Amino acid sequence: MRRKPLCSPKWTIGLCIALALAGCASSGSQPARALSTAEVRDRLVGTWQYEYNGVTIDVTYTPTTVTMRGVPPTPYVLSGNEITVDIVGPKTSIIEFRGNDVMIQTNKTDGQSYVFKRKSSS
């Protein structure tokens, strides 16, 4: 006597999809809302630090320029969460904020990411 399977393959696939969708819906995580250029600029302004080859570098952003040690204030162009700076040729990075004190800039050309931490005003 041949036994009938408990679940057909179609039913199993449908259940998996339903569970996956339910898990996404119940997790409460939603994609972050894209920040406007003005919102990114407001969060960007200030002094940040990042490490490059073991050296801590301070970078200061004003509403229109970026300054770091040994480099005169340089204008930048901000469009949404993309920043373009032309110090030695233009470089464009994607800006992502993690809270108020962590910023990640990912170079669009090579994919290299740099983690910046807001410098405390002490």
Image: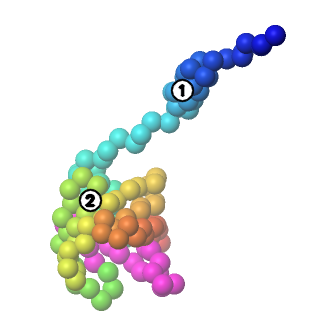
Vertical arrangement, residue 12 with respect to residue 90, above or below = above
Residue 71, image x and y in percent? Answer: 26, 85
C-alpha span from label 1 to label 2: 35 Å
Task: Identify which residue is drawn at 77% across, 13% down.
Answer: 3
Residue 106 among those drawn in magenta: no
Vertical arrangement, residue 104 with respect to residue 30, above or below = below
Residue 76, image x and y in percent? Answer: 20, 69
Residue 106: numbered disc: none
Horizontal side of residue 70 vs 118, given as left or right: left
Q: Are marks 1 and 2 in contact (CB under 8 Å)?
A: no
Q: Tell me which amino acid carries mark 2.
A: Glu
In front: 1, or 48?
Answer: 1
Task: Identify which residue is drawn at 24% across, 52% down.
Answer: 80
- Regarding residue 121, the answer to whether it shows in the image is no
Q: 10 Å neighbourhood of mark 1: few (<14), some, or many (≥20)?
A: few
Vertical arrangement, residue 47 with respect to residue 81, above or below = below
Residue 82: numbered disc: 2
Q: Which of marks 1 and 2 is in front?
A: 1
Residue 103, image x and y in percent? Answer: 41, 61
Q: In which quarter of the image is residue 41?
A: bottom left
Residue 60 among those drawn in magenta: yes
- Regarding residue 66, the answer to whether it shows in the image is yes
| Residue furthest to the bottom | 70
The structure's colour scheme is: rainbow
The residue where tag 1 is placed is: 17
Q: In which quarter of the image is residue 88?
A: bottom left
**Span colored in magenta:** 48-67
Horizontal side of residue 54 vs 84, given as left or right: right
User: Which of marks 2 and 1 precedes in the sequence?
Assistant: 1
| Residue furthest to the front | 1
